[in-house]
Amino acid sequence: MLAGAAVLTALVLALLTMAYLRPHRLAGVTAGQWIVGGGLILPIPILMLLTGTALVLGEQLLPRGEVAYRAEARAEQWAWRFSYPDVPGLPVSETLHIPAGEPVDIAVTSADVIHAFWVPRLGGKIDAIPGHRNVIRLQADEPGIYRGICAEFCGPGHETMQFRVEAHDLETFKSMMAGAAP
Amino acid sequence: MRQGDKIALISLVAGFTVWSVGFVALYGLQALGCAYGWPTHRAVLILAYGILVAVLAVPAFWPLRSDGEASATLSVAALWANRAALGAGVLVFLPVTFTSTCV
């Protein structure tokens, strides 16, 4: 994605530079050719490729079948509360703990208005809707801290409604869920 | 405003108006089908897609007859706007025919 963007940026900058430094080389290109070439032929395949990629990735985020790890995210103005249905004794926390390298189903809901759960580095986002339960499947490939935000404007505290996701190696995660400190 | 100009003006926004209505309709059908567990959900979405593309194709391939300079200019703009709406409809609505609908 970054490489593709770099190539396109370089192409546009090269054309712009040529328009200033060697204008005669571009003099043969008519206005119509610029519009059709730069406005249709160039962007349409790129947009179709990006859309196709988004559709495939979107399908992969769908929670099909069962996974071993589940969490619940409850949004409220203006905080996130995470709990684990398989470990009911664990206190509700503002940090989501997940195992690295394993898919986790996160059931997202809201106590008041519509929010949206989004951890940009882990992929897709999903709405948190009062009275409704949306499930998103995420996987952190490496242990670490991933920042999450509310991605749907939800009132004056919206921009402060952030959270963290801590991805632990599997053994640490299992011991945490068993009640030990991480 | 002359009658021909009015029709040309309506034609100018026709394609993307149908596109907008179609977008909301497909969204609604997708949500209703999931909520009520329609057994023919996919068939309904494919049918709706077909109808929308057919409706969008009408102004895209059926240029207005113009009766003056203003309506002639508007008619050309309308034709290409409606072709853009058809292209947008074919591409943007297509995923409802094959991607996952309900989880």
Image: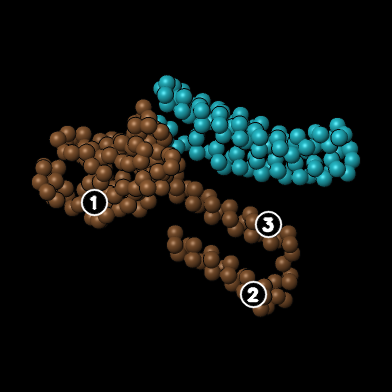
Chain colours: A brown, B cyan
Residue type at numbered disc 2: Met
Q: Nearer the viewer, residue B65 or B14?
A: B14
Q: Residue A65: horizontal and vertical position, in percent? A: 28, 35
Q: Residue B101: horizontal and vertical position, in percent? A: 43, 32
Q: Nearer the viewer, residue A54 or B10?
A: B10
Numbered circle sitting on residue A167 = 1
> Label 3 is found on which chain of the structure?
A
Residue pictured at 31% horizontal, 47% vertical: A163
Q: Residue A54: horizontal and vertical position, in percent? A: 45, 47
Q: Residue B70: horizontal and vertical position, in percent? A: 85, 43
Q: Are marks 1 and 2 on the same chain?
A: yes
Residue pictured at 51% horizontal, 66% vertical: A7
Residue pictured at 50% horizontal, 52% vertical: A49
Quarter of the rendering containing residue A151: top left
The residues tagged by marks 1 and 3 sit, at their Cα atoms, a distance apart of 48 Å
Relative placement, left or right, of A155 versus A66 is right
Residue type at numbered disc 3: Val
- Above/below status of A123 relative to B24: below
Relative placement, left or right, of B88 versus A33 is left
Q: Nearer the viewer, residue A142 or A177?
A: A177
Residue pictured at 35% horizontal, 33% vertical: A110
- Secondary structure under the numbered disc 1 in the rendered image: strand
- Secondary structure under the numbered disc 2 in the rendered image: helix
Q: Are marks 1 and 3 on the same chain?
A: yes
Relative placement, left or right, of A113 versus A103 is right
Q: Which residue is mark 3?
A: A36
> Label 2 is found on which chain of the structure?
A
- Which callout, 1 or 2, points at the residue further toward the start of the chain? 2
Q: Which residue is mark 2?
A: A18
